[in-house]
Image (cartoon, rainbow, N blue to C red):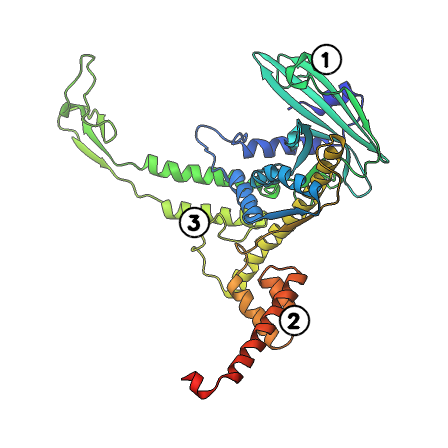
């Protein structure tokens, strides 16, 4: 990745990210990409960093629905947003792995495309009083032959004035900016303006999805941290333990050690083994020595598995996931209270992540609306975005339905609230459906009253 010192020198601006955060980000990226420093020929990766990130992405978005309604502009935005929705699980996974991800829209012909910019490809410059990024540099890199082309795109919001500045560079290395070139020197950037200023902008033209976990790497930083940032050491331990488990089987393979006198020899005088995996040749020193030895060691796989599973459970706890998410759910007997508590841990993590994702998508849709206006891509009009996250994966729907029905019966919960909660309806729809149910019940009762005994027969 391009270093922050290089960005600072080229753009003559301070970068609002500490060395601690840069180091941590490099570590999280390496772990997610199976490049952790502790991995060797003997210590293999269990892919736990990617597994935890992927599971969070799955739980957060598995049944996610987004509706953008209200006008022809809203219909256009909904059509453009669908392309983002198709990749939303991937977006959440990458954001969870690296602490955050940027969603930056731009005009592409008659459409609005969206770049998903990972945390090691953007540099925050300034934040507002609420910790929101209001100035940022995005890095766009391409390779042509043996040359690396890099574009630095700086966004800055001052009051309601928004400025976008672009500079391009060419070098022989991915990690070096090299010499500055014109934007027109690279075919993909020919239509990009070096600088543009937009008026009457309320907030930055990008959405920042920040993973909702307190930053214990740099508490002063408003940036997010990886979903596995508190379990780095445990993931390393898991890699070591799993490698020991694999070695237990490799080193414990059955073998037959037989004197070389029992084998024929090749042209080089080496013994010809019937099967190299099973047979081993030994020299006893004399014909009276031990002619045959069997090697069948006792394996310790259960002890190693128990230790590995204990580490997995610690990782689950530190990452805010329920026991059994990545560990063996059948290894420990648990009471109903313990099961409920561990499910609540996953539920809280998922709900907090969904809230953060909703904020990021609201900002993204706002930016898409601005670009639609600037590019005259759709008629102006109001829009409203609603988000529906189905939490049936982490919530027992049957138990919830039964409990809510009891609350209605005891008049603690209203029927409107019951429908809204269990039928996933808004208040207007719930009231309408209840009214229809009451009308149907009354009509059925009147019909039964009008029925004569002969008609019943």
Compared across the picture, whether 297 is left or right of 368 comes to left
Residue on which disc 3 sits: 306
Q: Earlier in the sequence, mark 3 or mark 1?
A: 1
**Quadrant position of residue 203:** top right
| Residue for badge 2 | 414
Q: Residue furthest right?
A: 159
Left or right of residue 155: residue 42: left
Please give the name of the residue rendered at 63% of the width and 64% of the height, measured from the top-left corner: 430
Q: Which residue is situated farthest in the bottom direction here?
A: 453
- Asked whether residue 213 appears in the rendered view, the answer is no
Disc 1 target residue: 182
Residue in the picture at 60% in, 35% down: 28
For numbered disc 1, what is the local secondary structure? Answer: loop
Q: Which numbered disc flags the more N-terminal residue, 1 or 2? A: 1
Occupied quadrant, residue 137: top right
Instruction: Answer with mark 2 or mark 3, whichever residue precedes in sequence.
Output: 3
Position above or below: 139 against 444: above
**Percent position (x, y) of residue 226?**
62, 40
Q: Percent from the top left, x then y, of residue 388?
A: 61, 52
Q: Nearer the viewer, residue 450 or 297?
A: 450
Name the quadrant containing residue 402.
Answer: bottom right
How many angstroms separate mark 2 from mark 3 (CA)? Answer: 49 Å
Given this view, does label 3 or label 1 mark the residue nearer the observer?
1
Badge 2 density bin: few <14, some 14–19, many ≥20, Cα 10 Å: some
Percent across and percent down for residue 224 are: 68, 40
Vertical position of residue 91 compared to residue 288: above or below: below
Q: Alpha-carbon distance for marks 3 and 1? A: 60 Å
Residues marked 1 and 2 touching at CB (< 8 Å): no
């Amino acid at each position: 990745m391009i270093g922050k010192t290089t960005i600072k020198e080229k753009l003559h601006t301070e970068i609002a990210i500490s060395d601690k955060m840069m180091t941590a980000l490099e570590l999280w990226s390496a772990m997610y990409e199976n490049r952790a420093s502790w991995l060797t020929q003997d210590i293999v990766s269990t892919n736990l960093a990617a597994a935890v990130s992927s599971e969070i992405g799955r739980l957060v978005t598995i049944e996610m629905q987004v509706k953008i309604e209200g006008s022809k502009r809203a219909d256009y935005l909904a059509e453009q947003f669908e392309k983002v929705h198709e990749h939303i699980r991937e977006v959440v996974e990458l954001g969870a792995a690296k602490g955050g991800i940027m969603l930056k829209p731009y005009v592409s012909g008659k459409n609005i495309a969206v770049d998903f910019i990972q945390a090691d490809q953007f540099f925050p410059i300034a934040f507002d009083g609420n910790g929101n990024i209001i100035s940022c540099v995005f890095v766009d890199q391409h390779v042509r032959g043996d040359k690396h082309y890099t574009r630095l795109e700086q966004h800055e919001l001052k009051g309601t004035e928004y400025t976008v500045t672009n500079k391009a560079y060419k070098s022989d290395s991915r990690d070096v900016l090299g010499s500055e070139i014109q934007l027109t020197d690279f075919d993909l950037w020919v239509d990009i303006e070096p600088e543009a200023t937009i008026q009457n902008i309320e907030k930055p033209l990008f959405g920042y999805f920040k993973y909702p976990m307190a930053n214990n790497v740099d508490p002063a930083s408003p940036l997010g941290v990886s979903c596995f940032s508190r379990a780095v050491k445990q993931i390393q331990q898991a890699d070591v333990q799993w490698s020991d488990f694999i070695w237990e089987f490799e080193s414990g393979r059955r073998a037959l050690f037989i004197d070389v006198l029992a084998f024929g020899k090749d042209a080089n005088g080496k013994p010809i083994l019937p099967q190299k995996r099973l047979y081993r040749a030994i020299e006893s020193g004399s014909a009276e020595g031990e002619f045959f030895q069997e090697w069948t060691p006792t394996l310790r796989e259960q002890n190693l598995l128990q230790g590995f599973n204990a580490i997995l459970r610690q990782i689950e706890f530190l990452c805010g996931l329920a026991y059994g998410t990545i560990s063996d759910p059948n290894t420990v007997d648990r009471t109903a209270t313990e099961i409920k508590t561990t499910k609540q841990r996953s539920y809280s993590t998922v709900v907090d992540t969904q809230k953060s994702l909703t904020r990021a998508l609201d900002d993204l849709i706002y930016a898409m609306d601005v670009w639609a206006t600037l590019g005259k891509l759709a008629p102006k009009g109001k829009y409203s975005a609603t988000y529906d996250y189905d939490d049936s994966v982490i919530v027992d729907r049957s138990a919830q339905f039964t409990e809510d029905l009891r609350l209605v019966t005891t008049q603690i919960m209203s029927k409107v609230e019951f429908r809204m909660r269990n039928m996933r309806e808004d208040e207007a729809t719930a009231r309408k459906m209840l009214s229809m149910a009451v009308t149907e019940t009354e009509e059925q009762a009147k019909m039964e009253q009008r029925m004569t005994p002969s008609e019943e027969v």
